[in-house]
């Protein structure tokens, strides 16, 4: 889910990220980072999912891994 949609659904439920932070005895920025996907915390994700009545994977789907070509280590000498 988009972070703004998560925050909107929390507001609809009458809860703010600050309230979640207070209940979990965390700083507001920790909850904000989890909502934005910058940081991860299973405890915060579970708390938000519980409030929204959704699963954690519905809110934060697993990120697809990006395959990248490995840099060549062969150096040709001249």
Image (spheres, grey):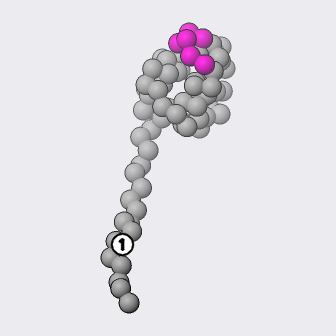
Q: Is residue 13 among the parts visible in the rendering?
A: no
Residue 55 sits in quarter: top left
Instruction: Decide whether the magenta segment is chiefly helix, strand or loop.
Output: loop
In the image, the segment drawn in magenta is 22-27
Crowd rating for badge 1 (residues with CA inside 10 Å; few <14, some 14–19, many 20+): few
Residue 9 in the image, given as x and y percentages of width and height: 62, 24
Q: Which residue is the site of mark 1?
A: 72
The answer to whether residue 25 is above or below residue 78 is above
Left or right: 14 with respect to 73? Answer: right
The answer to whether residue 71 is above or below residue 45 is below
Q: Nearer the viewer, residue 78 or 56?
A: 78
Residue 78 sits in quarter: bottom left
Point 41% across, 40% down: residue? 62
Q: Is residue 24 among the parts visible in the rendering?
A: yes
Residue 51 in the image, given as x and y percentages of width and height: 53, 16
Secondary structure type for disc 1: loop
């Amino acid at each position: 889910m988009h972070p703004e949609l998560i925050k909107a659904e929390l507001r609809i439920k009458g809860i703010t990220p600050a309230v979640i932070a207070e209940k979990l005895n965390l700083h507001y920025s920790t909850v904000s980072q989890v909502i934005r996907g910058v940081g991860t915390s299973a405890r915060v994700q579970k708390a938000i999912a519980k409030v929204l009545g959704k699963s954690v994977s519905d809110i934060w789907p697993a990120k697809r891994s990006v395959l990248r070509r490995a840099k060549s280590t062969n150096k040709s000498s001249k």
